[in-house]
Amino acid sequence: MKNSVLPLLFCLIFCSFMSAAQASELVNMPVVKLRSLDKVTARTQTFEANVGSTVKFGSLFIKVQACRKAPPIEEPEAVSFLQVWQLDKDERPEWVFSGWMFASSPGLSSMDHPIYDVWVLDCLEQKGGVEEAEQQEAEVRGEGEMEAEEAPSEPQIEQEAE
């Protein structure tokens, strides 16, 4: 029995070491490229947003907290930490999603929402990959990247009573 557990234990330690080593090689990038889908209308929108900014899509507000990308010589990966909330019928903010999203595996850590989908496409050095016509359409609908003071406040994180 001990002989069969030892190789498994070694494999687990090796895999965790390799994944930690790979994660440490990700480089911080200043811009994230996101795609959003309205499941009701089948409308999609591509956004580029600076880390630290908030993007509006439909009734969602998406705050980009970080965007990291593997160097060109590594296996392609882009990962972004996003916080997503919406206003309820009483105009109170409520969380929809908060976590890391992976471009290579959108289903690994996906947002569960009945109307909208959001996923990471890439992390970029600078903006410029979204067509101007698409950006103008979003601005007409009041969507896209917003100034910090324009975005509604994020939901408060509830502390458990001790």
Image: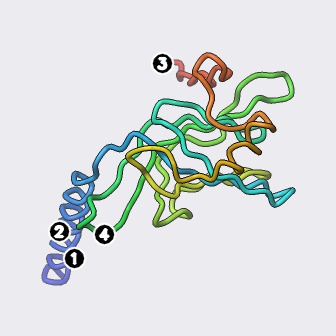
Q: Which residue is mark 2?
A: 14
Disc 2 crowd, CA 10 A, few/some/many (<14, 14-19, 20+): few
Q: Position of residue 7 (x, y in %)?
A: 16, 79
Q: CA distance from mark 3 to mark 2?
A: 38 Å
Identify the mark nearer the N-term, 1 or 3. Answer: 1
Identify the mark nearer the N-term, 3 or 2. Answer: 2
Q: Nearer the viewer, mark 1 or mark 3?
A: 1
| Label of residue 162 in the image | 3
Residue type for callout 4: Glu
Q: CA distance from mark 4 to mark 1?
A: 25 Å
Identify the mark nearer the N-term, 1 or 2. Answer: 1
Q: Which residue is mark 4?
A: 75
Q: Position of residue 135 (x, y in %)?
A: 68, 45
Secondary structure at badge 2 equals helix
Q: CA distance from mark 4 to mark 3?
A: 44 Å
Name the image quarter holding the N terminus: bottom left
Q: CA distance from mark 4 to mark 2?
A: 18 Å
Discs 4, 2 touching: Cβ within 8 Å = no
Q: Position of residue 6 (x, y in %)?
A: 14, 76
Secondary structure at badge 1 equals helix
Identify the mark nearer the N-term, 4 or 1. Answer: 1
> What kind of colouring is applied to the model shown?
rainbow
Q: Nearer the viewer, residue 47 or 77?
A: 47
| Label of residue 8 in the image | 1
Discs 4, 1 touching: Cβ within 8 Å = no
Give the vertical position of 49 relative to 75 (above or below): above
Identify the mark nearer the N-term, 4 or 2. Answer: 2
Q: Nearer the viewer, mark 1 or mark 2?
A: 2
Discs 4, 3 touching: Cβ within 8 Å = no
Residue type for callout 2: Phe
Q: Give the left or right position of residue 152, taking residue 10 as reference.
A: right
